[in-house]
Amino acid sequence: DAGVTQSPTHLIKTRGQQVTLRCSPKSGHDTVSWYQQALGQGPQFIFQYYEEEERQRGNFPDRFSGHQFPNYSSELNVNALLLGDSALYLCASSGGLADSYNEQFFGPGTRLTVL
Amino acid sequence: AQSVSQHNHHVILSEAASLELGCNYSYGGTVNLFWYVQYPGQHLQLLLKYFSGDPLVKGIKGFEAEFIKSKFSFNLRKPSVQWSDTAEYFCAVNAYSSASKIIFGSGTRLSIRP
């Protein structure tokens, strides 16, 4: 049973560029959450997708957007990259309704470096 | 707003020593509490969780945590650590009213001397 997968593993971009990160949830899961983990910090919640809609959002600017596809996979898009966007981006999936807590399983993350 | 504080940034212990990592959260309502672990080069994984009931919860690999509601604390303990426990440990809280949004602490790096 494949767990949560993310691509790419590493990515290097320059300031002002745009980036798209991808996530495939664990088999049987329909909810995807995205987190940003800066160096030396804990993960910070960006947003969550369920039934192809953004259900919850953390304190991140509109430059951060996402999408969920009918097969439950998800994308995280970041526009106008800043140096401070350099971080490990984690995807977590869970099963069940987004209005109740279900254990989240994390992927390995995508390491984004902005130069 | 919810927040989680982990008091120790880096803890260094010898094998067989006892471990206690502190965690305090701020939120006045009902919460779910977690400890996650991130071993070097591996995914973030759940160590243990508290939803309700017995405030002393047991997790994998001999870890346990105690929820003390009056102190807003959820400290992680292990009576005898092993070299393989070297990892980053994150305390996290999920407010009952905010579904699956998890707020993480800044983490504690645990180094075990063999």
Image: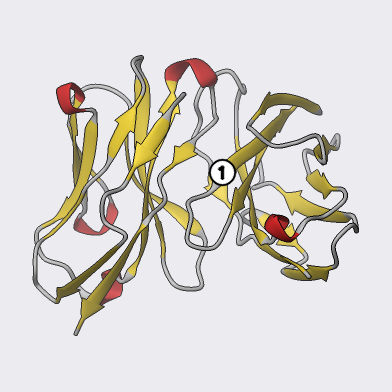
Residue lying at the far bottom of the rendered structure? B114
Q: Residue, x 45% and y 73% (percent of image)?
A: B40
- Where B61 falls versus B67 (above or below)? below
Label 1 marks a residue whose chain is A
Instruction: Please provide percent x and percent y for residue B104.
Output: 45, 42
- Where A30 falls versus B41 (above or below)? above
Residue lying at the far right of the rendered structure? A17
Q: Residue, x 41% and y 33% (percent of image)?
A: B3
Q: Quadrant of residue B99?
A: top right
Q: Quadrant of residue B2?
A: top left
- Where A24 falls versus B101 (above or below)? below
Q: Quadrant of the C terminus of chain B?
A: bottom left
User: Pointer 1: residues within 10 angstroms few (<14), some, or many (20+)?
Assistant: many
Q: Residue, x 9% and y 62% (percent of image)?
A: B18
The residue singled out by tag 1 in the image is A44
The way the protein has been coloured in the rendering is secondary structure
Q: Residue, x 18% and y 29% (percent of image)?
A: B55
